[in-house]
């Protein structure tokens, strides 16, 4: 039995509906964890795909970051600084201080050897704020390069959060732990995956097609509402769950009928059908002939021993 410290994000069940927005279109594990992380540490957290970084322009970020993002030169410097945090091998958490004196970090999120992206956090002064009273000609704030006094200075430096080094290191260590849990969530996409929860559901079904799979149980296993799971499963596979299972089982039955001497009834149950009549009906619907006729057409060249069974 796992203890409370062994909680995994993939164990969580997220609400399927939001009263303000109606049915949820997707349960986002990163948003769930980002909200809790910000509440606990006061630091903004955002997931970025490899090689990408969105500028810090919304109200969650410090005023200094938003001001930097508004300038053409400084916004490009911001982008380069944060891309430099992304370890391309996905092996290390990198922490750097940008040209404006703010410290940020990026934690790689890796699953099954594949790099999903990075959890970016920080945007704070660590230990000490630089002076803002006399920016001087070297000030990098947009429109402030030639200013030598604090008159008209927006004061964004003084408003930016400061953290002690030990506390910031603790916040980054915590993010590393959370990053491993985020990677385990079936709702987080690997590069090239159209919808990872459905990818994993399909893998699970293929691995044990004889199991009595139900839509409700699969949706619960992958943290989704049954109706939404059904919709996405059909979009992803082109078939309903029932039709997908029938196709897998009939494919397996075709192989057993052609290459083994198992009686038809044993083939039916070995492939996950609950009755012989269900097997005969489903097999004929998908192949155009009953199981015995299929075997007779194949066993002459494939397995003569199976003929007549």
Image (cartoon, helix red, strand yellow):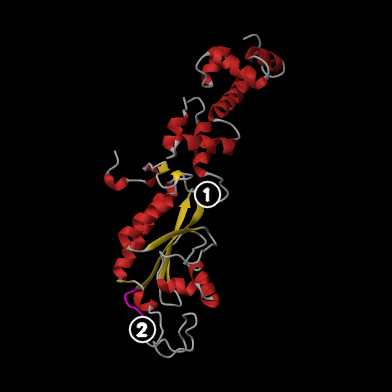
Q: Residue furthest left?
A: 3
Percent x, y for residue 178? 37, 54
Residue 16: mark in rendering: none
- The answer to whether residue 276 shows anywhere in this view is yes
Percent x, y for residue 294? 67, 16
Percent x, y for residue 166? 29, 68
Q: Residue furthest front?
A: 20
> Where 123 falls versus 254 (above or below)?
below
Q: Residue furthest bottom?
A: 148
Per the model, the C-alpha gap separating discs 2 and 1 is 43 Å
Percent x, y for residue 201? 50, 36
Kind of element beneath mark 1? loop
Magenta stretch, main secondary structure class: loop
Is residue 70 within the magenta segment?
Answer: no
The C terminus appears in which quarter of the rendering? top right
Q: Which residues are magenta?
A: 126-132
Q: Residue at x 46, y 80 (%)?
A: 141
- The answer to whether residue 97 shows anywhere in this view is no
Q: Nearer the viewer, residue 110 or 188?
A: 188
Residue corresponding to mark 1? 190
Residue corresponding to mark 2? 131
> Where 281 falls versus 137 (above or below)?
above
Q: Residue at x 32, y 78 (%)?
A: 128
Q: Residue at x 53, y 40 (%)?
A: 199
The N terminus appears in which quarter of the rendering? top left
Local packing at callout 2 (Cα closer than 10 Å; few below 14, some 14-19, many 20+) is: few
The numbered mark, 2 or 1, whose residue comes first in the sequence reads: 2
């Amino acid at each position: 039995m796992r203890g409370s410290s062994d909680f995994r994000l993939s164990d969580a069940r997220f609400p399927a509906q939001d009263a303000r927005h109606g049915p949820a279109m997707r349960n986002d594990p990163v948003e769930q964890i980002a909200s809790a992380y910000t509440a606990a540490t006061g630091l903004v957290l955002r997931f970025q795909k490899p090689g990408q970084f969105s500028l810090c322009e919304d109200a969650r970020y410090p005023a200094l970051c938003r001001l930097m993002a508004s300038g053409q030169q400084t916004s490009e410097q911001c982008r380069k600084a944060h891309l430099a945090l992304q370890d391309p091998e996905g092996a290390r958490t990198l922490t750097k201080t940008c040209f404006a004196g703010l410290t940020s970090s990026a934690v790689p999120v890796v699953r099954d050897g594949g790099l999903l992206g990075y959890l970016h956090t920080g945007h704070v002064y660590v230990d000490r704020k630089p002076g803002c009273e006399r920016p001087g000609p070297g000030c990098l704030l947009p429109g402030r390069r030639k200013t030598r006094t604090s008159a008209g200075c927006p004061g964004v430096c003084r408003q930016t959060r400061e953290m002690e080094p030990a506390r910031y290191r603790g916040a980054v260590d915590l993010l590393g732990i959370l990053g491993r849990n985020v990677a385990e969530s079936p709702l987080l996409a690997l590069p090239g995956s159209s919808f990872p929860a459905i990818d994993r559901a399909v893998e699970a079904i293929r691995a044990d097609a004889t199991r009595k799979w139900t839509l409700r149980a699969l949706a619960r296993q992958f943290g989704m509402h049954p109706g939404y799971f059904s919709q996405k499963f059909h979009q992803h596979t082109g078939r309903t769950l029932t039709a997908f299972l029938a196709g897998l089982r009939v494919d397996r039955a075709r192989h057993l009928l052609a290459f083994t001497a198992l009686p038809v009834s044993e083939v039916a149950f070995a492939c996950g059908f609950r009755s012989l009549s269900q097997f005969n009906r489903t097999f004929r619907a998908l192949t155009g002939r009953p199981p015995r006729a299929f075997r007779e057409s194949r066993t002459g060249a494939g397995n003569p021993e199976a003929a007549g069974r």
